[in-house]
Amino acid sequence: MVMLAKGELSQQELGTELGIDKSNVARLCAKMVDAGHVEQRSSEHDGRSRRVSLTGAGKRLAREVDAASGARFGALLSALPKSRRGLVLEALQHLVGALDAAPPVVLENRKPR
């Protein structure tokens, strides 16, 4: 939902937000372009940089995924005893904070042995 919240991003910004490397971002964006969910264009300031934005179909899909995710997590939370929900939410906030503070993990493309 990064693109829905932030609007147009460079591929580099998108990779940083998602914690994935530039080659994976490029592949992801190409698939999303093929599916009609994003549009790409060259940056006005740097011809090597690509800008990515959601299409109307991409925005609709992002909203559907966001709603489904919210419903799923809401159902999970409601399955917990009411007395424990606050503790779970607090723990999740700590985990999100730790993830935000952690450096991104870069996986190298390695050939199988």
Image (cartoon, rainbow, N blue to C red):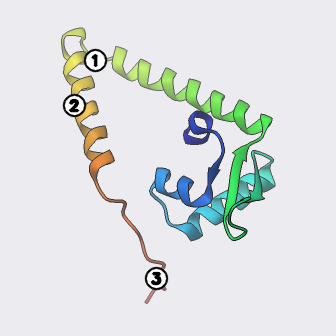
The answer to which of marks 2 and 1 sits earlier in the sequence is 1
Q: Secondary structure at mark 1?
A: loop
Q: Residue at x 31, y 39 (%)?
A: 96
Find out whether the residues at labels 1 and 3 contact each other: C-beta distance under 8 Å: no
Residues 55 and 85: in front is: 55
Quarter occupied by the C terminus: bottom left
Distance Cα–Cα, label 1 vs label 3: 42 Å
Give the amino acid at mark 3: Arg
Q: Is residue 112 found left or right of 80 in the rendered image?
A: right
Residues 51 and 76: in front is: 51
**Residue wearing tag 3:** 110
**Residue wearing tag 1:** 80
Q: Residue at x 50, y 66 (%)?
A: 21
Single out the mark in the foreground, 2 or 1.
Answer: 2
| Mark 3 burial class by Cα count in 10 Å: few <14, some 14-19, many 20+ | few
Distance Cα–Cα, label 2 vs label 3: 35 Å
**Residue wearing tag 2:** 91
Give the amino acid at mark 2: Ala
The answer to which of marks 2 and 3 sits earlier in the sequence is 2
Distance Cα–Cα, label 2 vs label 1: 14 Å
The answer to which quarter of the image holds residue 83 is top left
Q: Secondary structure at mark 3?
A: loop
Residues 79 and 61: in front is: 61
Give the amino acid at mark 1: Leu
The outermost residue toward the bottom is: 113
Q: Secondary structure at mark 2?
A: helix
